[in-house]
Image (cartoon, grey):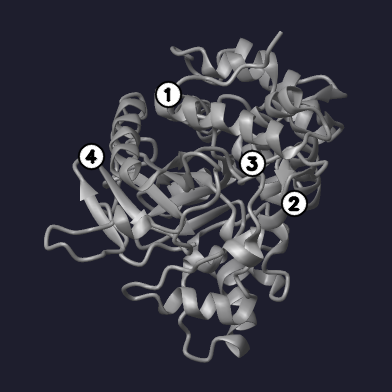
Amino acid sequence: MPTLDPIVPPPHIAAFTGYGIELEYMIVDRETLAARPMADVLLVDAEGNIANEVDHDELAWSNELVRHVVELKTNGPTESLKALEDNFHADLVEINRLLEPHGACLMPTAMHPLFDPDSETRLWPFGQNEIYAVYNRIFDCRGHGWSNLQSMHINLPFADDAEFTRLHAAIRAVLPLIPALSAASPFEEGRATGWMDTRLRYYRDNQREVPEISGRVIPEAVTSIDDYHARILQPMYRAIAPHDPGEILADDWLNSRAAIARFERQTIEIRIIDLQECPAADLAIARAVVALIQRLYEGEIFGFDRQQALEQGALADLLFECARRGSAARIEHCNWLDAFGIEAPVSAGLAWRAMFDRGWLGDDPGGHLQTILEHGTLAERIKRRTGNDPDRGVIVETYRELVECLAENRRFLPRN
């Protein structure tokens, strides 16, 4: 979902010389964990007016579609991902301080496990909200796919057509395995869904009235920026036009593939990473994903032509197998495994472990990546804590601990 007043970084930043991170959080009641629609309490400018976005030094805070979600993001590109963990955590502490007098706080993970979208959804009513109004008219945003999806977005820049094409190919090769590292949404309305990454299932399906918007979720292979416009954006704009005669949505952010081009800021934005229990875990995943993409971009693992040849349907099947089963997903996509030099068949968790052991994922100074590789995705750790059929009390107790993990910037571990 677009932010209405985006911060636009300078153009022509070369690949892997700057990064943008966005983290979305739900505001909840401190006692009951019920959603609290009060993001406007946080989004007040220097004149005391409710704003769509406010600056907080290195970060900015902004609204989303609904009033119970606030987004924190880098205030323009940052040269390194290493320092961001402390910046995000400091701002989360400040937000919790501001929410405390209202009996509210922030809750992590990618979906609220008890949220009822029919009764609890409150759309953002302030400022220039015409985009949200059009989305609501076309798709009816009272649903988990609109009002209960919290994620991390990673923005990677490109300087020109050649960098864009290489970056897009490298990202496309990595996307299918990401949910096996980041899945954090196993519950919906108090029930286990059978998916570790339920958010991604909704991401795939919530705009099915206009299927061109998300396509197969894995983006098509493209050969240039012009080819991207021809193959992805123009068909999407034609498809939405009968529903949007005012062309309010005719922009590149309408695209709901797993990674989308944001041409006004010359980045490719990865959108399918579930929010974790704390910024340290989010940034550990971001560093690992970016490190792997960079190695592919530079041709260290396998080259551009082989990346482009990876078939979209097979990549999409792998993506949703990982979304369903997390690190236990079984990989049988021989072309993908052969390209990475991993023997088939293998679990997705072991594939990530192999890439970590080969040094492809960079360092892991806080050990958060190691926690995921040893104990599974956050969704799997949550499920081991709650069991497959927990009552409401067990879910609330578990997610209260996750609220504490966020406040203290610490990992969530399964009990022995």
Q: To which quarter of the image does residue 192 belong?
A: top right
Q: Residue, x 61% and y 80% (percent of image)? A: 138
The residue under label 4 is 58
Distance in Å between CA atoms under marks 3 and 1: 26 Å
The residue under label 1 is 409
* Amino acid residing under circle 2: Gln
Residue 289 in the image, given as x and y percentages of width and height? 54, 31
Q: Please tell me the numbered disc located at residue 92.
A: none
Distance in Å between CA atoms under marks 4 and 3: 28 Å
Closest to the observer: 413 or 291?
413
Residue 7 in the image, given as x and y percentages of width and height? 28, 56
* Amino acid residing under circle 1: Asn
Q: Residues within 10 Å of mark 3 (few under 14, many from 20)?
A: many
Q: Please tell me the numbered disc located at residue 175.
A: 3
Q: Please tell me the numbered disc located at residue 312.
A: 2
* Amino acid residing under circle 3: Leu
Q: Residues within 10 Å of mark 1 (few under 14, many from 20)?
A: many
**395 lies above or below 243:** above
Tell me whether the residue at label 4 lies in contact with that at label 3, contact meaning CB atoms closer than 8 angstroms.
no
